[in-house]
Structure formats: C-alpha cells, structure tokens
Image (cartoon, rainbow, N blue to C red):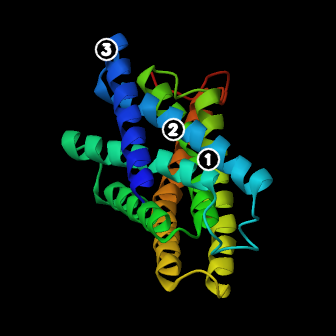
Amino acid sequence: MTLMVVGVVLCLSGWISLYTLLCNINGSRGYEWNCRLVTLVHGIMAVCITAYIGYIDGPWPFTYPGTKNTPLQITALALSLGYFLFDMGWCVYFQTEGPVMLAHHTISILGIMLTLGLGESGIESCSVLFGSEVTNPLLQTRWFLRQTGRYDSALGDAVDVVFVLLFVLMRVVVGGFMLYCELASPRPMIVIKCGGVAMYTMSWVFMVDIVRFTLKKSRNWGRRRGEQRPPVMVNGHDGKTD
C-alpha cells in the first residue's frame, strides 16, 4: 500500500511538472490551453496502456471481472489517479467546470482509489478507463479547433461525428454490456458493482448533453447547406426583393 501511495504521488508530481513545463515554454497560449495539452497526453497514454491490458495482457474483462490486480493494471490506474487529482485541483481552482464534470472526476478518483485499495477488479477499472478516455483526444481536438478558428469546417464536422459515434458505442453500448457482466458475476465486491452503476449513470448524464448537441449540430448543418444552396430563379431573378 505504501508503494502504491508513493507511486500515485509521483504520478501526480509528474503531471504537475508537465503542466508547469508547458506553461513556461508555451505561456502565450494561456492556462487552459496547456491544461488541455496535459489532458490530451493523459488520454492518449491511458488509451494505449489500457488497450494493451485489455486486449493483450489480459484477463478479458467481460469474462473475468473481480480478479486480482496485476502490476501493469496498478501502474495504469496510479498514472490516471495522479492525473485526475491534478485535473480536479485545476478545475476547482480555476472554476472552469460545472457540477456534472466535477462529479465525474470525483467518481473516477474514488473508483480508482477503491480498486487500488482492495487489490482487485483492476481489469474492470482499466476497461472503464479505456472506454471513458478513448473519446478524450477527439474532445480536446474539438476544443483546439474552436480556439484556432477552424472548428466550422469539414474537419470539425468529422471530429464531432466520430466523437458522438464513439461515445455511444463505447460508453453506452459496450459500457452497458460491461456493467451487465460486472453485476452478473459473483466475484466482484458489491461496492465495486455500485461504482460501476455510478459510472454508467454518469455516461447517460453526458449522453443527454450529447443528444442536445447533436440536435443543435444538425440544425446548424441544415442552415449551412441552406446558405450554400444557389438562389431559386423566378422570372430571371433570384427571388430577393430589392
């Protein structure tokens, strides 16, 4: 347990150091820009490590929930716990996020701490981490496109479409099946199962916002197509009044 605490502290220090370094060498971009760069780095690292754990190192999360944590699982969870602690502190200090995102961070922190403390169910936690972080690079890319004035473009539309599809697939469909396997298995502790329900509930809270965003985006697409459509000619005129 002492080694795990030390590992988490080192990971937290590493994320803080990366953020400080980015602020020093990229100070003109502002604090949020550099924080989102840290978030992007964490998202890519978390997805790569947890994908390796789930698909190669094992065990298969849908078949063997509730198993003992492996060293690689502990490393991945400690790395992400350090990041979530850093990002939670940053969000609270700068007051940039609402209660939903803060609740998501809180559940993530408590869930990882519980998994590390109990010494089991690391494979489920890594799977949840993979599903929640796989859309993160797209989310950050969308923000960077907006900041650089390139969001209202084909690239911005593609990022939005892939993000929505990937979110629905991974966090709602696959996440729902993962929760079913978790609840149906006798191995995971009841507190772990409750944590799984909490995380899946948060996914549906985000899903409501995504549905609203999709409807708004669809209306914007329709408006943009209407603006690009050539004027209808009526008696040799475009129909506009003088």
Q: What is the three-letter code of the residue carrying label 3?
A: Asn
Label 2 element class:
helix
Closer-to-camera residue (56/156): 56
Residue that numbered label 1 is attached to: 134
Closer-to-camera residue (50/14): 14
Instruction: Tell me if mark 2 has few (under 14), some (14-19) or many (20+) residues whose alpha carbon lies within 10 angstroms of its own.
Output: many
Label 3 element class:
helix
The CA span between labels 3 and 2 is 19 Å
Look at the numbered discs 2 and 1 and tell me whether their residues touch, using CB distance below 8 Å. Answer: no
Which of marks 2 and 3 precedes in the sequence? Answer: 3
Residue 45 image-quadrant placement: top right
Label 1 element class:
loop
Closer-to-camera residue (33/22): 22
Which of marks 1 and 2 precedes in the sequence? Answer: 2
Q: Position of residue 15 (x, y in %)?
A: 40, 34
Q: What is the three-letter code of the residue carrying label 1?
A: Val
In the figure, is residue 198 to the left or right of 166? left
Residue 138 visible in the shown view:
no
Residue that numbered label 3 is attached to: 24
Residue that numbered label 2 is attached to: 42
Residue located at (46% from left, 21% from top): 149
